[in-house]
Image: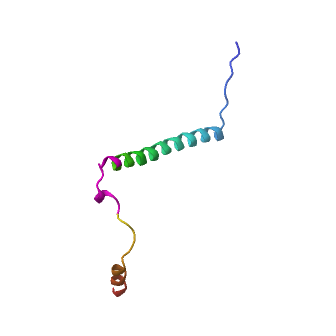
Amino acid sequence: MTSFLLYFDAGLGALIVQGIAAVVAGVVLFSKTAMFKIKLFLGLIKESDLQDSIDIDEDEEEDRKLD
């Protein structure tokens, strides 16, 4: 009976670990986005929960210049 042993060098091991990390990160990011869209569709997220705009009003800009 002949047994075949697989040889994994450091490069292949790193490639496997990187692939697993990429899959986990992709699943986490996709699930967060999907859950946010589902909650927004069902009305479970209020408008006040959404992040504010980063635009600066002209009045605020003038106040900063005066300081």
Q: As displayed, is residue 66 above or below residue 13?
A: below
- Viewport quadrant of the C terminus: bottom left
Residue 57 falls left or right of residue 5: left
Residue 27 percent coordinates (x, y): 47, 42
Residue 6 falls left or right of residue 31: right
User: Which is nearer the eye, 12 or 50?
Assistant: 50
Q: As displayed, is residue 57 above or below residue 50?
A: below
Per the rendered image, the range of residues in magenta is 41-51
Residue 35 percent coordinates (x, y): 38, 45
Residue 16 percent coordinates (x, y): 59, 38
User: Which is nearer the eye, 5 or 21?
Assistant: 21
Magenta stretch holds residue 6: no
Check the image and name the residue furthest to the right: 2
- Viewport quadrant of the N terminus: top right
The residue sitting at 65% across, 41% down in the picture is 11
Magenta stretch holds residue 45: yes
Res 7 → quadrant:
top right
Check the image and name the residue furthest to the bottom: 66
Residue 53 percent coordinates (x, y): 37, 66
The total of numbered circles placed on residues is 0
The residue sitting at 66% across, 27% down in the picture is 6
User: Which is nearer the eye, 55 or 28?
Assistant: 55
Res 13 → quadrant:
top right
Q: As displayed, is residue 54 above or below residue 8?
A: below
The residue sitting at 37% across, 85% down in the picture is 65
